[in-house]
Amino acid sequence: MTCTTHHNACDCRQRAIDANLGRLLLSDLRYSMGRCSTAPHSCSEGIRQLWHMCDDAHRRFMLRDLREQFEMWERTDRKCPGVLGDDCDVQTWSELLAWMEAQR
């Protein structure tokens, strides 16, 4: 195996890992939105810690999903706790959204 082939194989494995990580974080985000527990905070922290390892497609999906949740929350006059959770959860998601947008 030549060095070039080895690097290409490593690149392929890394892209697969990045995509799998992106899917896991996206699933965590979707599960955690609307929860009134420790899930929003731990999900937010996980996304911040692993953002740089996610592929671009999953970063866009996470950003889109969080924006859509805020749009839905706004349409319900901020009265639907199931959309983003309690006030402390809304704050967590708001801070994460601002952070994610700053990473672009």
Image: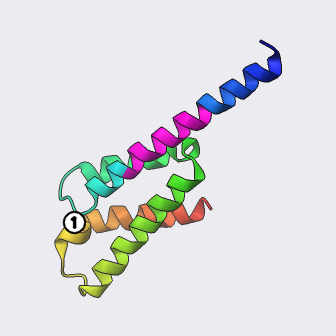
Residue 46 position within the rendered picture, expressed as x and y whole percent measured from the top left: 41, 44
Can you tell which quarter of the image residue 84 is in?
A: bottom left
Can you tell which quarter of the image residue 35 is in?
A: bottom left
Mark 1, other Cα within 10 Å: few <14 / some 14–19 / many ≥20: many
Residue 47 position within the rendered picture, expressed as x and y whole percent measured from the top left: 44, 48
Name the image colouring.
rainbow
Q: Could you tell me which quadrant the N terminus lies in?
A: top right
In this view, 58 is above or below 54: below
Can you tell which quarter of the image residue 10 is in?
A: top right
- x 45%, y 65%: residue: 97
Residue that sits furthest to the top in the current view: 1
- Residue nearest the observer in this picture, 46 or 25: 25
In this view, 38 is above or below 9: below
Counting every numbered tag in the picture gives 1
Q: Which residues are magenta?
A: 14-26
Residue 24: say if magenta: yes
Residue 20: say if magenta: yes
